[in-house]
Amino acid sequence: MATDSWINETLYREWGQRFLVKRELARVQSGFQDIVVFESHTHGRVMLLDGVVQITEGDEFVYQEMLAHVPLLAHGAARHVLIIGAGDGGVLRRVLMHPQVTRAVMVEIDGEVIRLSKEFLPGIAADAWDDPRAEVIVGDGIDYVRHADAGGFDVIIVDSTDPIGVGEVLFTDAFYADCARILTPGGLVVNQCGVPFMQPDELRETSARRRRAFPEVSAYVAAVPTYVGGFMTLGFAAKVPGLARVPVETIRRRAEAAGILGTTGYWTPEIHVAAFDLPPYIARHLAP
């Protein structure tokens, strides 16, 4: 449906962003949330969940690359990867770029997100849906993690909405304890922790919860234009120390071996390492 109307993001009551809608493509009320997909004049196609921007074709590469490549290259030998959420398939595609990955399980609670992404945002996942290493499950990520075998995954990537509504249960003590249980001894988990300039409690509280289950807790940043309010933080929790401080030469060597160098629009070995050096206004929320 062609339109010249504006759509306003509703994440913050006092401040936000809006898009001039070129064409509305879908508006669906799923069993979990309100989903809108539209074509913008500036960012390509955009998906909102419950009024909050989740992904745009224009800048999705920033978030997806940092959410996928950083943990896999920090680990260095991940073969089994679990993705919670990320129903657009972009994280799945980046994970499968790493040839050492033999199994990537993606658990998305809302099948409508997957369906609409396949129909209206096909370039985000490309051919990842058909990769034989991918196992896509429409189901509850909390339940999956609770019942998964111990030590079954090397890396867990949590791409959830903010801790409200359907995403709230992915920020609990029990969830992180289960993540630690199903990770291998050298495993790690990453998860989005919001924009700390606007959502400081999100990083502070999730860091405290992750610290109860993991000996090393850190965070790194990515500058995603449509996640308004400054740097987006990505939480990083590992079962062994040192994975948040892998030397740049090692990251470069691993990326070259994986064929990642030269394929990215945001991630580089230098950005990987520098992303863990947090501005003081962010770092203080990691304090125990």
Image (cartoon, rainbow, N blue to C red):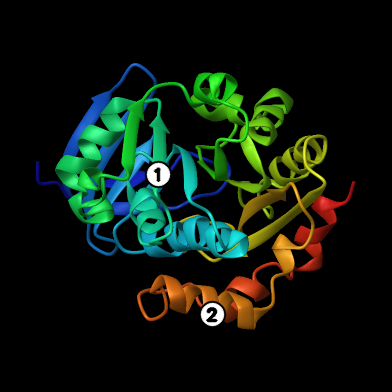
Q: Residue at x 40, y 44 (%)?
A: 103
Measured as percent of width and height from the top left, residue 11 is found at 51, 40
- Label 2: which residue? 253
- Classed neighbour count for the residue bearing mark 1: other residues with Cα under 10 Å, few (<14), some (14–19), many (≥20): some
Left or right, 166 with reference to 116: right
Three-letter amino acid code of the residue under disc 1: Arg
- Please, is residue 89 above or below residue 174 in the view? below
The foreground one among 19 and 161 is 161
Q: Residue at x 36, y 55 (%)?
A: 96
* Residue sitting at the far right: 288
- Please, is residue 130 above or below residue 222 in the view? above
Instruction: Classify mark 2: helix, strand or loop.
Output: helix
Residue 250, quarter of picture: bottom right
- Please, is residue 208 above or below residue 167 in the view? below
The foreground one among 279 and 173 is 173
Three-letter amino acid code of the residue under disc 2: Arg
Residue 41, quarter of picture: bottom left
